[in-house]
Image (cartoon, helix red, strand yellow):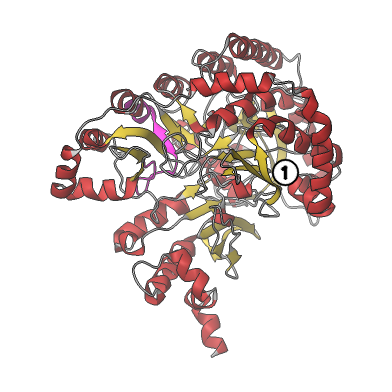
Amino acid sequence: MYDYSDFDEGFVRARVAQFTDQVERRLDGSLTEEEFRPLRLMNGLYLQLHAYMLRVAIPYGTINPRQMRALAAIAQTYDKGYGHFTTRQNIQFNWPKLPDVPAILHALADVGMHAIQTSGNCVRNVTADHFAGAAADEIEDPRPYAELLRQWSTDHPEFQFLPRKFKIAITGSPNDRAVTGAHDIGLRMVRNEAGEPGFAVLVGGGLGRTPMVGMVVREFLPVADLLPYVEAVLSVYNTIGRRDNKYKARIKITLHETGKVEISRMIETRFAELRPQFGGADQRLLDDIRAAFAAPVLRDAPVGAYDAFHKADPTFRAWADTNLSTHRNAQHAIVTISLKAHGETPGDATADQMRLIADLSERFGHNEIRISHEQNVILPHVHKSDLPSLHAMLMTAGLATANVGLASDIIACPGMDYCALATARSIPVAQEIALRLREVGLEEEVGPLKIKISGCINACGHHHVGHIGILGLDRAGVENYQITLGGDGTEDTVVGDKTGPGFAYDQVVGAVERVLRAYLGLRLSVEETFLEAFKRVGMEPFKAALYPEAARDAA
Amino acid sequence: MSRGFTPKVVTANLLREGDVVYLTADDRWAVHHHEAELIDDEAHGQMRLLHAAAQKLVVVGAYLADAKQGARGPEPVHFREAFRTRGPSNYAHGKQVDHADV
């Protein structure tokens, strides 16, 4: 993976020194909170409900074992022994104390990490397919482009005070695992007629208050044009994006109000101005970055041990059948380590678990670790013959839950258990749904399902693109949960439809169960997934299951 | 009590630790909600809020939160404030263990 250059190292160290000084000046009273707040947010430090929260960037979800151990050490030394992996492939520490934050940032800098641009109206952490570099369906590893974008956007003087935050996601595969359709800019690698790789560029996607699916503003962008084109998009947005109204300040609104044709024209005009200014330095840099992402040398060895275990051990088989994905090399597998043990907090890992993951990555995984936006951990390159040993070691740490892609593999934002913006809790809803589905044994029967929960309208939990989405709201001083169905975060991005009135906290688990039982009753076969069934039958059968009183009244 | 005014407490987070605290009638910052001063007059509430906001080296983000009289003292009205008195529901972290109620 990419290692910091002297420039990166110097930049991050300087920033740590600067923020250390700012914290000292806040603590001695030289800075007021009004002065300090934007400074701490620029360094990823929020003040949440019960404590400060530090959000650390994990660029494009790629992290190495040394970094993972540093996160474990921070969790143990400065927090309560765990960290929370987020839907933007970051990690959040929920309990740091302000005087300790400079030391945490120093510890991060020691392993090439930081919290810069994890908040504020700037280009945020660029997210990528968590199977990048390993997936069988990939055109090209998207991470070198993500790293190029990271370097370009970090402290970019023109884009530090955008109208609003700006999120970029990139996938190198036609099967979109990075939710590119719901980002300010979504980059999807495609090939043109000549077979050359490039990007389909989507602009104006986003969830939150006004969910919208991104529109394609360029069908094919040659890879060499990436930076000037993205800069053109940012430049147009920076100029005409609305700063008068926070709720209309994202580029999705700019696109909606300007129109796709006109904004595409403006982007192309700006691109024509910018393109000649990129004299090739970016491409030379990209070549260097590509070298840093060279694929690991994979071992050629028999996979008989895997086949034998798969046949003999039902626990291993259940795990292998759900948590493994197809690697481009048939002897290898992509391992998803579930951070969704039933009843646990989605996305949380203890310091011990982080250390074990680091060890396993070194021993079996070519020192590679990924964090997915679905709040799981990926070991992208594991030889199949190593999987039985890997699985056995995961079991010792509560990391062998066989539920990836199933109903209990729930995305949940921190919600009102931590977040100051939240309007209701998310985590306990996720915990209780998972426990209930296990109790009644529905999970395996239901099959592939994505439940996503947000604790407020900002939609960090991606509820709009959940097959079942749950949005926690405050209705007259009581937690209330609105359910949406049919959302889809893949290349076919769809925003789910609301079912109707929301459900009280103690009713939402039952409501989800009724939806699932309705699905089991109406699916054509076990092969028809929940999402396929929903597309076929629409909302009505599910409404009838959710609101039996209304159905009875209408009858 | 002035008409139409919902009683309030002044609450904030400690600057250094981030912990939730409440302003008491004798000008301390207490960790327990029931120790807070229950304010039933709007003008007095504004004065107490100004007093809190002036303590820039002690607390951050002081505000007035709705409250009501309970058996042992003021109790929160809204669930958000109730959560702030305890800590998160997924772990025994925060006040529910650090300052377990007496």
Q: Vertical placement of A444 versus A543: above or below?
A: above
Residue situated in front as seen by the camera: A100 or B99: A100
Looking at the image, which residue sits at the far bottom? Answer: A555
Q: Vertical placement of A123 versus A109: above or below?
A: below
The image shows residue A415 at horizontal and vertical percentages of 55, 46
Disc 1 chain ID: B
Residue situated in front as seen by the camera: B101 or A266: A266
The image shows residue A303 at horizontal and vertical percentages of 20, 37
Q: Report helix, strand or loop for mark 1.
A: loop
Query: What residue lies at 58% left-to-right and 66% top-to-bottom?
Result: A502
Query: What residue lies at 62% left-to-right and 19% top-to-bottom?
Result: A285
Picture quadrant where residue B8 is located: top right
Horizontal side of B53 relative to B21 (left or right) equals right
Question: Which range of residues does the magenta coloring cover?
Answer: A337-356
Q: Which amino acid does label 1 sit on?
A: Ile
Res A242 visible: no
The image shows residue B29 at horizontal and vertical percentages of 63, 29
Picture quadrant where residue A482 is located: bottom right
Picture quadrant where residue B36 is located: top right
State yes or no: residue A340 in magenta: yes
Q: How many labels does the image show?
A: 1
The image shows residue A498 at horizontal and vertical percentages of 60, 66
Looking at the image, which residue sits at the far front? Answer: A194
Q: Name the residue under label 1.
A: B39
Residue situated in front as seen by the camera: A49 or A71: A71
Res A308 visible: yes
State yes or no: residue A224 in magenta: no
